[in-house]
Amino acid sequence: MLLRVPSAMHDSEPDANSNFLRQFSDSEESSEHFSPTPAGYVRGRTRFVVVVGTVMSGLGKGIFASSLAKLMQDKGLTVAPMKLEGYLNIDSGTLNPYRHGEVFVLEDGLETDMDLGTYERILNQNLSRKNFITAGQIYTEILERERRGGYLGRDVQMIPHVTGVVKMRLRELAMAGPKGQQLDMVFVEVGGTAGDYENGFYIEALRELAFEEGDDSTCFVALTYILEPSILGEQKSKAAQLGMKRLMEAGIQPHIIACRAKNPVTPKVTQKISMFSNVPLKRVFSMHDRESIYVIPDAMRAAGLDREILSILGLHDRVNAGAEDSARSAWSAFARRLSAPRDHRVTIGISGKYASLRDAYASIDKAIEHCGVELSAEIDVRWLDTSDVHTKEGAAKLLEGADAIIVPGGFGSRGVEGKIHCAAHARTQRIPFLGICLGFQVAVIEYARNVLTLRDANSSEFDPTTSTVIISELPDQKRIEGIMGGTMRLGAQDVLVTPGSLASFLFANAKTVHERFRHRYEVDPAFIDRLEAGGLIFSGRHPKHPIMQMLELPVTAHPYFIGGQFHPELLSRPLKPHPMFMGLVAAAIAQREPTFAQTALGQRWVRSNASTVSPSNRS
Ligand code: GLN
């Protein structure tokens, strides 16, 4: 499609292209200064903070940028983040979580980089496809337009066309403020480091943007790294200086330099960096390692980083001091509780496939952390690889000492049999269990095999030849929801909650909840009645169609056994942990300390008769 050349393109397709081009004045379209802006956009009103890394990747640019954005949000300013990815993939959906970390799904179904999860959690704000650009998206847009004849005889160039689209996307995001107003600030995180081929056009676009938006419109923050080789025993700034030079060669003079380092950066080093980069000493900050990412906003504030940004961008008069006080105290209380000694102790086993890499399950890790703070529980998380588990006994051994079990999402058959044994272990041993997406499907397969004695029950994803396909790709349902063959059901959807269920208890009697999905297979409706007659409860359903979205065991049979076809971890926020994780951790605490159920938190999160009923002998 992309490469088809339309005949007589200028005459035959005036509509879409001329609409596109009508946004720009004639002089702009034909000049070298091709810099489109959305209708109604006022230049200079939105301020941009650009965070660029130097020296090396992995410095925590996302955490840095989101913490800074949070400080500004706390002051009552409207903010949005933008992540610029250098890779040619259109989204992160096809990336291997083992190499790139988890795929984070947004409300609108876009599959993004895990950094977007950090932004959502820290800003407590839902993001959309407006907040995420890849080089693949930019080039696709340009090449498709070129094939439609959208450039009217011009040669299409990196500058001004590619950079023009980047600027357009940044300005479109700036227009996405509440009630259609322009945002106060857009925080731009450039993927990679200064000097990479992949992000060069982004850096150039940002240079142009700063120029076009006018004085005081854009603040460039260089995040750099200060080496401290153990053989020397002192901090060295040369790599940081060279990194800065790379940025300056691209025409960017940083306004602020944030130095990542193991230890607080010494005055000698900050002075050198200041002097070699033309950045006043008061704008060179030490961003050394902290005990937790949640103390970074407070640390930035204590160092005066927020004030400097406000000064550089002339934003002091937009600050709402009252709003800042309350937001700040809520966050500081969270950070304090985070480092305070905990009242309870539990161990959670997570049966995954990428057990060796936490980033592959970053949101689950965070969701558990949020609950630990809320419930004052020290949670020992064990990442377990189920690839070598082939029996009940094997699962029991792997899960020894686990007070709760999570079977997380996943794709492909490796490790699945082991996960099924883990679900069986959780069910029969009455260990609190949470099945997520694949984990939900695994719980259904396990129940069908061991309780309904449908020994061949399986998902067509793992064994398409099995006689009992209980989890399958259902073309009818895909059609109902307008999902194209082969693609996944992605993004947020309503889930109808069965009144009186454990799910309803956890979600505070909500009739519907809104959760994010990323899956292709689901429970075959032909088995629903049999599963329910056998004791499994489907407590969350699609509002209209027989698509099962939550399952549970009756509270008389198991203290806490629940699963979701969606990904609850994507919605957990530091100050608002997800109910299904809260229920899991609370049930685990209650198993160890029965008196916990009587406390205020216990009453909220442990279902009342859960720990007092005798175990079932279903298996
Ligand atoms: N592989 C399963 C499916 O596609 C589960 C997906 C997931 O866990 N995200 O339905």
Image (cartoon, helix red, strand yellow):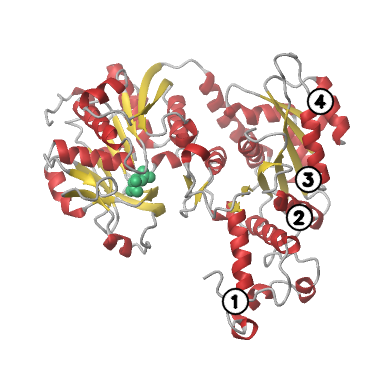
Spot occupied by residue 544 in the image (x, y as percentages of width and height): 28, 59
Circle nearer the N terminus (1, 4):
1
Q: Is residue 558 above or below residue 216?
A: above
Instruction: Compute the Cα span from label 4 to label 3.
Output: 23 Å
Which residue is identified by label 3?
A: 313
Instruction: Compute the Cα span from label 1 to label 2.
Output: 26 Å
Q: Secondary structure at mark 3?
A: helix
Circle nearer the N terminus (4, 2):
2
Residue 134 seen from this side: yes
Spot occupied by residue 463 in the image (x, y as percentages of width and height): 24, 46
User: Which residue sits at x=83%, y=45%?
Assistant: 249
Which residue is identified by label 1?
A: 16
Mark 4 Cα within 10 Å, few/some/many (few <14, many 20+)? many
**Amino acid type of the residue tagged 4 in the rendering:** Thr
Q: Secondary structure at mark 2?
A: helix
Q: Is residue 450 above or below residue 295?
A: below
**Amino acid type of the residue tagged 2 in the rendering:** Leu
Mark 2 Cα within 10 Å, few/some/many (few <14, many 20+)? many
Q: Quadrant of residue 542?
A: bottom left
Residue 399 seen from this side: no
Spot occupied by residue 115 in the image (x, y as percentages of width and height): 56, 41
Quick check: 386 left or right of 79? left
> Residue 209 — which label?
2
Circle nearer the N terminus (1, 3):
1
Instruction: Compute the Cα span from label 1 to label 4.
Output: 53 Å
Tell which tag, 1 or 3, sits nearer the viewer: 1
